[in-house]
Amino acid sequence: MPVEDKVETRDAALVPYQLPFPADAAKEIVIPGAIAEDERIWVPQAENVAFRPLCLNASQGYWMNLLRVRKSGVLSRHRHPAPVHGWVLKGRWYYLEHDWQATEGSYVYEPPGETHTLVVPEDVTEMITYFQVNGVMLYVDPWGKTMGYEDVFTKIDMCRAHYEKVGLGADFVSQFIR
Ligand code: FE
């Protein structure tokens, strides 16, 4: 196709797509103000550690969430058999196993095979990072022995239990599940 045939006038460019989306396509998720001010949205995970779900992708086995750590909390040592992507929105953190720090505005890629312990320094009052976690997180001892795990299904279960407890209702989590 000659390149000029691909160039639309502005008017033509503003005509929306006219066909229905695929019948099997899932519904989009839009979360305004995703760094929630309503404390009930944040699901406690460990002492000073909480997360808020964004997309709990049960069909593909991954989850997108905001991880929030306050008062120098620690996210226990764990192994990732699948990749992780992170974007630091607030504060900073580091892994005991690496010599770099993830500062506000940083993007981090964690390749499959990583085992690490996330620590928020004492002078950081609040850390928030957007994480995509694929597959499973295996909680391990310092020698790699598996002590427990999390996957998208345990995340969903945690959300259900928490939202029920705080009065939002267990079904509150359904809007984040695809
Ligand atoms: Fe991790």
Image (cartoon, rainbow, N blue to C red):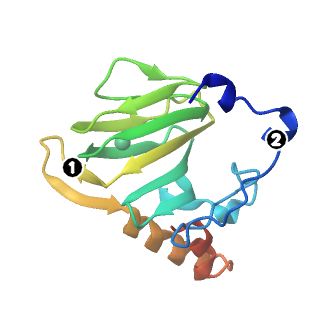
- 140 relative to 166 in the view: left or right: left
Residue 70: image location, x then y, percent = 58, 43
User: CA gap, disc 1 to disc 2?
Assistant: 56 Å
The residue that appears at 51% across and 67% down in the rendered structure is 178
Decide if residue 49 is in sight here. no
Residue 21 vertical placement versus 95 (above, below) = below
Residue 8: image location, x then y, percent = 76, 33
Q: Which residue is mark 2?
A: 12
Q: Which mark is residue 172?
A: none
| Residue 111: quarter of image | top left
Name the foreground residue: 43 vs 142.
Answer: 43
In the image, what residue type sits under mark 2?
A: Ala
The residue that appears at 29% across and 36% down in the rendered structure is 116
Q: Which residue is mark 1?
A: 140
| Residue 148: quarter of image | bottom left
The residue that appears at 66% across and 67% down in the rendered structure is 20
Decide if residue 112 is in sight here. yes
Residue 79: image location, x then y, percent = 25, 45
Name the foreground residue: 125 vs 110.
Answer: 110
Residue 25: image location, x then y, percent = 54, 66
| Element carrying mark 1 | strand
In the image, what residue type sits under mark 1?
A: Val
Does label 1 or label 2 sit earlier along the sequence?
Answer: 2
Name the foreground residue: 146 vs 65.
Answer: 65
**Quadrant, the N terminus:** top right
- 141 relative to 65 in the view: left or right: left
Name the foreground residue: 134 vs 95.
Answer: 134
The residue that appears at 28% across and 27% down in the rendered structure is 97
Residue 22 vertical placement versus 174 (above, below) = above
Residue mark closest to the camera, 1 vs 2: 2
